[in-house]
Amino acid sequence: MPARGARLLRGALDRARAPVDSPRESLLRVALVDAGIPEPQVQVAIRTAAGVRHADLGWPEHRLLLEYQGDEHRTSRRRWLDDLTRVQLLEDAGYRVILVGAADLEDDARSLAARIRRALA
């Protein structure tokens, strides 16, 4: 007999991706997939004028990227400035960047999913 919770664990492992910088990025990705959005790539490498930069999640074939902004992005001046530069570089490379925060997960990401659905259309 399988161990208690084995089915849930297998399901969770099937949905795990690497590399991911934060648990919130994973929650965001899973919520979007559960809302019917095509699964985004993780840590999307984009060639910019200042070299390769990585977006948290994205659909490079649609030139659409997501950047999850946790509290550290708000409270660390260095992180905030680095984020501003990276987003500008990604946009200058021809990508639309949607900034995402914790509030975007509150309704199971339904509002954000609708926004992404429109951007992917």
Image: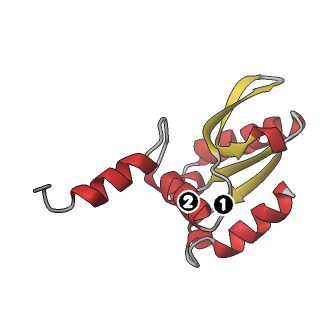
Disc 1 element: strand
Which residue is pictured at 60% across the width and 48% down the height?
Answer: 77
Report if the CB atoms under discs 2 and 1 are less than 8 Å apart: yes
Which residue is pictured at 30% across the width and 60% down the height?
Answer: 8
Q: What residue type is labelled 1?
A: Val
Report the quarter where the N terminus lies. Answer: bottom left
Q: Which of 10 and 83 is in front in this view?
A: 10
Q: In this view, does 46 lie to the left or right of 110?
A: right
Q: Is residue 63 visible?
A: no
Where is 113 relative to 40, above or below? below
Disc 2 element: helix
Q: Position of residue 63 (x, y in %)?
A: 83, 42
Which residue is pictured at 56% across the width and 59% down the height?
Answer: 28
Q: Nearer the viewer, residue 2 or 23?
A: 2
Name the outermost residue toward the left. 1
Q: Name the residue under label 1.
A: 100
Q: In this view, does 4 lie to the left or right of 45?
A: left
Which residue is pictured at 55% across the width and 76% down the height?
Answer: 106
Which dot, 2 or 1, sits closer to the camera?
Answer: 2
Where is 120 relative to 104, above or below? above
Q: Can residue 87 be seen in this view?
A: yes
Color theme of the render: secondary structure
Q: Where is residue 74 in the image (x, y as percent from the top left)?
A: 59, 57
Determine crowd level at label 1: few under 14, some 14-19, many 20+ residues with C-alpha closer than 10 A. Answer: some
Q: Residue 28 carries which label?
A: 2
Q: In the figure, residue 43 lies in which quadrant?
A: top right
Marks 2/1: CA–CA distance: 9 Å
Report the quarter where the C terminus lies. Answer: bottom right
Q: Which of 33 and 94 is in front in this view?
A: 33
